[in-house]
Amino acid sequence: MAYIELRNVSKSFGVGKNRTQVLSNINLEIEEGEFVAIVGFTGSGKTTLINLISGLMMPDEGEVLFKGKPVTGPSHERGVIFQNYSLLPWLNVGNNVGMAVKEAFKKMLRRDRNKRVKEYVDMVNLLPAINKLPKELSGGMRQRVSVTRALSMSPEVILMDEPLSALDALTRGNLQQEILKIWNKDKKTALLITNDVDEGILMADRIIPLKPGPKATLGPEYKINLERPRDKTALNHNEEYKKLRNGIIEYLIQIGEQRSSTKKNTYVLPNIKPRIKPMPFQRISFK
């Protein structure tokens, strides 16, 4: 039995003529302790997919299973790191993280919760800003708080919806390593949504492309047989990495071209005529 399983899952939005099927017949199995990355184009339905697994949305058809049981709503067992910050603006950094810790560890003593909050805030180098409100932080700092909040709950599954896309390269690289360190320590099941093939190869065991929507489906999976820990610099000289990377990118280019060739956009311009008003006469005197 797979740890996470999607069986013939479909999801649509809108009603009547405006109804669009975003995902169609999605089948996916993720084993316990596995790290899977879903890559695809913007607007292909990646966020919808992760919202279905997290329980924030329900499928129109099919079912989502977690440890063999249907997902019926959100749970701290499945921690989500969102693409946006999703921070409570009236709480400072420490309290944003602390609220999540309190929810996940209801019986933990206050001093132990506070210690845990500080440890995780320090992990992303935000301890000097622990008493600051979100409005006092940069976008990258807010995203680091969002990452910290999800990881501090020690979820059984880490669901990541392009969580590092808004960060600078240095911070992004550091958080990639921190997430991998936490994953490697407890071998938590992880699903990463990304449009960065290199990020997927660095972090995951498998990469699965999501074909562009509407009616998006999963493409062929690519197994990543590269030893851990993986070093970005060393990977650039690894022939297996080059072959894998080129194969995934070529596939994405191919399905991107197919979408462009089949997609027809027709724009009807409104019949608008300019309304010309005579300019009022203005007397100008020169002195």
Image (cartoon, helix red, strand yellow):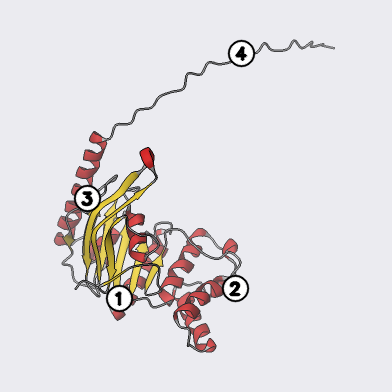
Disc 2 from disc 1: Cα separation: 30 Å
Q: Is residue 214 above or below residue 273?
A: below
Please identify the quadrant where the C terminus is shown: top right
Disc 4 from disc 3: Cα separation: 53 Å
| Residue neighbourhood size for the residue with mark 2, other residues' Cα within 10 Å, grouped as few (<14), some (14–19), many (≥20) | some
Between tags 1 and 3, which lies in front? 1
Identify the amino acid type marked 1: Lys
- Residue 141 horizontal/vertical position (percent): 50, 64
Disc 2 from disc 4: Cα separation: 59 Å
SS under mark 3: helix
Disc 2 from disc 3: Cα separation: 43 Å
Between tags 4 and 3, which lies in front? 4
| Residue neighbourhood size for the residue with mark 4, other residues' Cα within 10 Å, grouped as few (<14), some (14–19), many (≥20) | few
What residue lies at 45% left-to-right and 77% top-to-bottom?
120
- Residue 219 horizontal/vertical position (percent): 19, 53
Tell me whether circle 2 and circle 1 mark residues in contact (CB < 8 Å). no
SS under mark 1: loop
> Which of the two discs, 2 and 4, labels the residue nearer the N terminus?
2
Disc 3 target residue: 249
